[in-house]
Each structure stands twice: as structure tokens, then as C-alpha cells.
Amino acid sequence: MRLSIIDQSPVSSGSTPAQALQNTIELARLADRLGYTRYWIAEHHDIESLASPAPEVLIARLTAETTRIRLGSGGVMLPHYSPYKVAEQFRMLHALAPDRIDLAVGRAPGGGPLSSLALRRERTESPFPDDFPNQLVELLGFLHREFHPSHPFSRLTVTPDMPGGPTVWLLGSSPWSSHAAAELGLPYAFAHFIAPEHAASTLEYYIAHFKPSRYLAAPQAIVAISGVCAETDEEALRLATSVRLVRRRIRAGEKGLVPSVEEAVRELGPAALEPRVDDGTLPSLFIGSPTTLRQQVTLMADQWHLDEVMIVTIMHDHRARMRSYELLAAALNAG
């Protein structure tokens, strides 16, 4: 099974955003050595605990820090931006690391209403139009020179102009995204860690309704899960309290850095250290030893016919986070 990483550059309490970005660089180097397939950078705005509002900037740095692994966005929140500018940015990244760049685009804002308003160049009292499908088609047109000769944009060249280009993925957490990916014939990455309840139906639809295209001959899907791995189930449960508290705070609209395990246990209570009851269903947060996670992830991959899984791991302790990815790579044979 192929393993990949999506990194949100978490900022731990007692640390700094600058250190979080250095941690991302160190983790990307490790993933490159361990044989992970992809390393994607998330885009989040006005979230104090996540230090990655501009994935294209961090990806550029990682092209110089890695040699083999594919690098990409997870994803670029396209409604905020000009498709032409995004095409230029990722053409530039492709020139820096030819045939190693993924451009996963999403429809979600990556933040709250106020940050979305601040990102917009034009601000009116009327609701901003949802033209994401048109934006996506325009982006593909720029990257693949697909504009009709009569279209004004057909006269534009997206530089750096060189063979090949970034691979465009559609990133989603709702049925709509699977419909669009299937219709356009694009590879699809589903954010299970955001909306696990939609995973089965969206993947089934995507595979059943996929239309071969010039981009892709057969459906290609990745599921991105949240996971915490440690030497034992008990230690993994303890380390996972930090991300469980982060999730609860974000849902409540609260800000703050990734808490320590001790702070998380105090706030969540001793029940947070109790193991999940195995009822035969897939967890929304994969927690456990290498043996436990191998069983859970293999079950998921078998159910949904996956050959690649992407993992996001948030912990307070960066060394424990690095170790988690090492254990996962060994357990699931990364690469």
C-alpha cells in the first residue's frame, strides 16, 4: 500500500509558528527517506494552531529539501484566487521539481467568513457567486492549453513554459466533489478526517461514475485520514488527546495552540484514555500501535478498494509525531 502525508503545520503550545514550519521541513525530509509517496501542504486561514496559509510558498522550500517524494497542496482553496495566478504558481513549482508536483484544489474556504472576506479582492454587499466549477475548468484550460482558439485566454502562455506540468487533483469532503471529479475525469482525494460520514458514498459514486479523460484513464482515489501511532495502544491514546482537544475547540469556534497531553487530559477527562469499543465500524480518528493501525487501515483500504492512503497527524510533541510516521511506514510498507 502506498502511504502519503498531508501536513497542516501544527503549532504546539510553548512553541512558535516558525518552529512549526521547521518541523514541517524536517518531517518532509523524513517522509522522503521512508518512501512515502506524496507530501501535501494544507491551506488554513486565521487558525492559530495551524501555520500554513500559503502552501505554494512552503512547497517551494520543500522542493530543495527532498529528492523523490511528490509535493503538493492539500489543497489550494481555489474560490479565493485567480485560476491564472494559481496556474503560474504551480507551473513555477513544476519547473523547480519536474514531475513531482501535485495541485489539489478545494472548494472550502479554509477558514471562517471573515478571513474569506479579507481574501477577496472585490467586496460587495451581495453574496459572492459560487463559480468554483468554472474556476476549475479555467484552471485546467490554463495548465493544459485547452482554451478554444477564439477564447481570449488562448493567446496567453502560462510560464515557465516547459514540458509536463502539475497533476491536478480535486480535494473534497462532500458528495459534490466526487461528482465533479468523476465528471471531469480527475483524480480525487477525500478528506475522511473532516467528514468520515460521507466517505463510503462519495467514493462509491466517484468510482462508479468516473469518465475517462485526457488527464486520467481510470479512477484514482486517495482517502486522507487522521492518525496517531505509537509503540503501544495505550501510548497512542495518550498522545491522541491533544488532537482530540484541538478538534473539539475548532468545532466550538475557539482558538489556541495544540495543547500538551497533560492539558488535554485535564480538559477532556480520564475517559479520553479509554480504548474505543470495537463495533466493526471504521474510526473517525485512527489511534493505536502499528499492529492496530495496520488492521484498521487495511480494512478500510479493502472496503473501498484503495491502494493509497494519506495521513494527517497532529501531536504536541514533534518527536512523537515523527516517530508515528516511522511506525506507520514500517507497518504499512510505505512506497
Image (cartoon, rainbow, N blue to C red):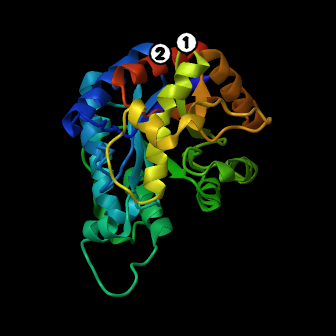
- Residue type highlighted by circle 1: Ala
Residue 332 visible within the image: no
Q: Are marks 1 and 2 in contact (CB under 8 Å)?
A: yes
- Residue type highlighted by circle 2: Glu
Numbered disc 2: secondary structure: helix
Q: Residue, x 63% and y 31% (percent of image)?
A: 274
* Mark 1: few/some/many CA within 10 Å (<14, 14-19, 20+): few
**Circle 2 residue:** 326
Q: Residue, x 62% and y 40% (percent of image)?
A: 220
On screen, 138 above or below 234? Answer: below
217 or 37, which lies in front?
Answer: 37
**Circle 1 residue:** 330
* Mark 2: few/some/many CA within 10 Å (<14, 14-19, 20+): some
Residue 177, image x and y in percent? 58, 58
287 or 277, which lies in front?
Answer: 277
293 or 62, which lies in front?
Answer: 293
Q: Residue, x 43% and y 34% (percent of image)?
A: 314
Q: Which mark is residue 23?
A: none
Quadrant of res 175: bottom right
Residue 180 visible within the image: yes
54 or 296, which lies in front?
Answer: 296
